[in-house]
Image (tube, rainbow, N blue to C red):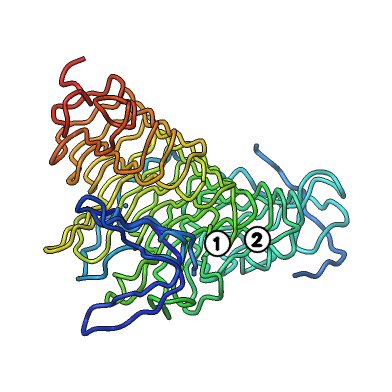
């Protein structure tokens, strides 16, 4: 079976009856490995401001190998098969604790001197400015902006943008010169940033580009997107993308990052969060914490390219469930990227089609020898649970619960070596809990090191034990 990573490679898409077939010139998105068809997500080819004098109010601060091709190998290189129409899954329970941000606001009763138009602060030059956004003026009548982008344009480094409940159908871009900017929903998840009918390149609903230490907190960020296709530049859509910058993404619900047209559900496109992209020589850094990411078309989270890093923790990431259209991946780290992936729940990335050896993955690790630690995750009901794939070298996979996966629990494939696979509990996976097809001087004649892993079934003796 082949896990398809998220790949962003230039390509040409042919329509054959109801099916879509993509021919990529970046490189093959699928590779046959021991009968497995590998699909990953690659570098995603996904394919301003007036200042004037005003009275300012006082601010009170409380304060999925054919795994679904992991994000196409290059975000534009969508690896994966294009076949039938999958059923949507119900939204997974959101595990965030309720955090009331309503205390982050402005005291409407005092005037505080001279400042930026639409901003409030404690006194001129003292502390960050607060820019308030309300789509209709109902929830926050003193808001100076009705669009989030207008507030971002007016804000400077270290400022805050408070977004009141409402639906904001726009793309939000945070460019250079906005370091330290904080955007937050006044009421958790009630400020909805929705893909506009026509998106501009790059096709991301929220884009952090060339800005550092940006925070995006407790929004609902949602598609679906329209005016799309399987080939550049119509593909490569993302919910949140970090390009040559850094961001903290916390407490958000990122959902429906997919095409609105079911006929295009097989396109290797639609990533919840993309950090860096090898195909375009881009890197990124992100802390991705306490988010719910679901109903994506290709992948939940993709960290791509040498120099990119992400801390991925305490997220709920769930795919479509069993599909015969596209192989999804929950978390994909590859092409030289590094990451710490821990304490997440990753599920329902499944692909099966008669005559196809493609599969999907809960976690897909490939083509990296950088620091990658995958630990204390609950990985279940995927194709491969944790897929350690080609040229994954020296990674740590430890203390994970891996269960009820359809195409092996913890699996190391050809050309992966010197990986530490330790103290994992693998159970109720088919065909086996512990799988390693490599050859070397490691455990049981493999090229990897299996240490105190628990599992009832294995493809060669000595990988895991049924009892402590």
> Which residue is nearer to you in this view: 416 or 307?
416
> Which residue is nearer to you in this view: 166 or 387?
387
Which residue does the numbered mark 2 point to in the structure image? 174
- Alpha carbons under labels 1 and 2: distance apart: 8 Å
Answer above or below: position of 16 versus 93: below
The residue depicted at 17 percent of the width and 58 percent of the height is 352
Answer above or below: position of 15 versus 67: below
Helix, strand or loop at mark 2: strand
The residue depicted at 62 percent of the width and 69 percent of the height is 146
Q: Is residue 395 left or right of residue 139?
A: left
Helix, strand or loop at mark 1: strand
> Which residue is nearer to you in this view: 326 or 183?
326
Crowding near the residue tagged with mark 2, few <14, some 14–19, many ≥20 C-alpha atoms within 10 Å: many
Q: Is residue 80 left or right of residue 419?
A: left
Please provide percent x and percent y for residue 294. Answer: 35, 54
Q: Tags 1 and 2 in contact by the CB under 8 Å rule?
A: yes
Please provide percent x and percent y for residue 142. Answer: 68, 61
Which label's residue is closer to the chain start, 1 or 2?
2
Please provide percent x and percent y for residue 367. Answer: 44, 47
Which residue does the numbered mark 1 point to in the structure image? 206
Crowding near the residue tagged with mark 1, few <14, some 14–19, many ≥20 C-alpha atoms within 10 Å: many
């Amino acid at each position: 079976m082949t896990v398809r990573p998220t790949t962003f490679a230039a390509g040409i898409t042919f329509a054959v009856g109801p099916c879509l077939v993509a021919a990529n010139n970046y490189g093959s998105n699928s590779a046959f490995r021991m009968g497995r068809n590998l699909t990953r997500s690659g570098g995603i080819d996904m394919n301003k401001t007036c200042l004037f004098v005003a009275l300012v109010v006082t601010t009170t601060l409380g304060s999925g190998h054919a795994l679904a091709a992991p994000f196409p190998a290059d975000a534009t290189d969508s690896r994966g098969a294009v076949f039938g129409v999958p059923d949507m899954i119900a939204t997974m329970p959101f595990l965030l604790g309720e955090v009331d941000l309503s205390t982050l606001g402005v005291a409407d009763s005092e005037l505080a001197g001279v400042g930026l138009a639409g901003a409030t602060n404690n006194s001129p030059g003292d502390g960050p400015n607060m820019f308030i956004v309300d789509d209709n003026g109902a929830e926050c009548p003193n808001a100076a902006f009705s669009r989030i982008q207008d507030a971002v344009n007016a804000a400077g480094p270290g400022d805050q943008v408070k977004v009141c409940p409402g639906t904001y159908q726009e793309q939000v871009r945070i460019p250079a010169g906005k370091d330290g900017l904080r955007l937050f929903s006044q009421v958790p998840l009630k400020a909805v940033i929705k893909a506009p009918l026509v998106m501009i390149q790059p096709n991301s609903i929220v884009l952090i580009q060339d800005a550092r230490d940006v925070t995006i907190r407790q929004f609902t960020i949602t598609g679906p997107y329209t005016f799309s296709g399987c080939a550049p530049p119509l593909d490569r859509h993302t919910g949140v993308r970090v390009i040559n910058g850094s961001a903290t993404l916390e407490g958000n619900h990122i959902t429906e990052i997919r095409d609105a047209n079911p006929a295009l559900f097989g396109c290797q496109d639609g990533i919840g969060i993309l950090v860096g992209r090898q195909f375009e020589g881009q890197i990124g850094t992100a802390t991705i914490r306490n988010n719910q990411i679901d109903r994506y078309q290709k992948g939940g989270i993709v960290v791509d390219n040498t120099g990119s890093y992400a801390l991925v923790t305490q997220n709920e990431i769930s795919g479509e469930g069993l599909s015969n259209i596209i192989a999804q991946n929950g978390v994909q780290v590859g092409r030289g990227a590094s990451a710490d992936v821990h304490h997440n729940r990753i599920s329902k990335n499944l692909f099966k089609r008669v005559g196809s050896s493609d599969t999907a993955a809960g976690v897909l690790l490939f083509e990296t020898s950088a620091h990658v630690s995958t630990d204390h995750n609950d990985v279940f009901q995927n194709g491969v649970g944790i897929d350690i794939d080609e040229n994954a070298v020296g990674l740590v996979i430890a203390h994970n619960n891996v269960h009820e996966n359809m195409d092996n629990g913890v699996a190391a494939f050809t050309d992966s070596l010197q990986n530490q696979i330790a103290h994992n509990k693998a159970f109720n996976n088919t065909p086996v809990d512990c799988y390693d097809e490599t050859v070397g001087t490691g455990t049981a004649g493999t090229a990897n090191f299996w240490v105190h892993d628990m599992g009832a079934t294995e493809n060669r003796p000595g990988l895991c034990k049924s009892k402590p």
